Amino acid sequence: MSRCSKRTVFTIVVLASLCVPRGADAQSPVCGFPAAYPGDLAPAASIAAWMAARAAAVGLPPELPVMASLVESNLQNVNSGDADSVGFFQMRVGIWNQGIYAGYPDSPELQVKWFLDRATAVLGDAMLHGGRDLLNRADEFGKWIDAALPPSRASRGRYQLRLEEARQLIAAGRALAGSWPFDGSTPPDDAPRATITAWLATRARAAGLPGELPVMAALVESGLRNLPSEGGDSAGYFGMRLSIWNGGPYAGFPANPELQVKWFIDQAHIARAQRIAAGDVYFGQDPNQFGEWIADVERPAEHLRGRYQLALEEARTLMRLGCGG
């Protein structure tokens, strides 16, 4: 499929993204996701789970690359296509086989990075123009892909039709991969730290956030424990203020850890949207920013903001333990 038509805004934002770490370098340990490309001959479900993992690692809906590839290549790393188009997303060799994407025909990781870069550019543009709900609009995923590629007219509208198929393949691939997601109810307060970590990381991943985020926050705020208020004004894994948050959608949160993690996820989405609206289009994709992201949620005293980033490696160690390696 031809990729000659490009939009100026995509070019500007994608060029700005070249210095942002993505793909394998930016990836986090995740329960049950394949750590590496499973191979051209792997089952479609395994390839779908691999793509979904790469999308989740940069905060994008896992279905996006799978839906796109189902239309463009039937989820195959094809070595030929219309004109000089190859790979999962039918990228034009004459345009993209250079710079940071040089060698992509032989590198599926570069192919999925290319797609995620373009999808991220669309999200950034939408955020800057008020479209902050794009991540949560599954019925708009097809339009998102359409804007990211953009396809020939014959392909327009076809992406959205592959949403359910993509979801089924991802679920099957995750089952093949092992322990994703964290099944079972909320772990009890006295559960092992690795189990609590797996629960927090899974909830974050399901919401399109890095798994480390709530783990790092809870390590600092509570030592990864569901702390009682004990007459004070803060409680739970994230030190939530009762006088502010124990009402509305979070009423009863001290006795409900699921409400606590929902609060953190909600506030993390808001914090990222605010940073993007302020001009930092790729905020949160670099793990070195995770501490600042958490500080925007927790709002500690200025001299304490740096504490969260120091918990990154401990969070990742616990995730490896809790997620089975």
Image (cartoon, grey):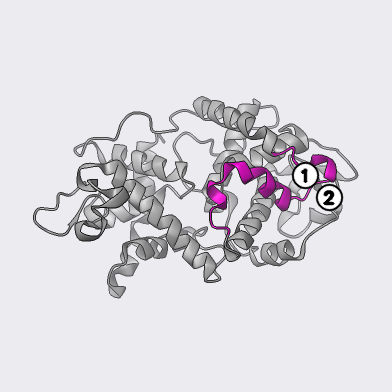
Q: Which one is in front, 242 or 223?
A: 242
Report if the CB atoms under discs 2 and 1 are less than 8 Å apart: yes
Residue matched to label 1 = 105
Is label 1 in a helix, a strand or a loop?
A: helix
* Residue 143 on the magenta span: yes
Q: Residue at x 51, y 60 (%)?
A: 286
Q: Residue at x 44, y 59 (%)?
A: 270
Residue type at mark 1 is Pro
Q: Is residue 172 left or right of residue 313?
A: right
Q: Residue at x 55, y 49 (%)?
A: 135
Residue 10 image label: none
Q: Badge 1, how many Cα within 10 Å: few under 14, some, many 20+?
A: many
Q: Residue furthest right?
A: 83
Q: Which one is in front, 194 or 73?
A: 73
Q: Residue furthest bottom?
A: 302
- Give percent across and percent down for residue 101: 73, 54
Q: Badge 2, how many Cα within 10 Å: few under 14, some, many 20+?
A: some
Q: Is residue 163 above or below residue 216?
A: above
Q: Is residue 67 left or right of residue 222?
A: right
Q: Earlier in the sequence, mark 2 or mark 1?
A: 2
Q: Quadrant of the C terminus?
A: top left
- Give percent across and percent down for residue 104: 74, 48
Q: Is residue 180 above or below residue 261?
A: above
Residue type at mark 2 is Val
Residue matched to label 2 = 93
Q: Is residue 90 above or below residue 131?
A: above
Could you tell me if residue 77 is visible in this image?
no
Is label 2 in a helix, a strand or a loop?
A: helix
Tell me where the magenta segment starts and ends, as one range.
Answer: 131-159
Could you tell me if residue 34 is visible in this image?
yes
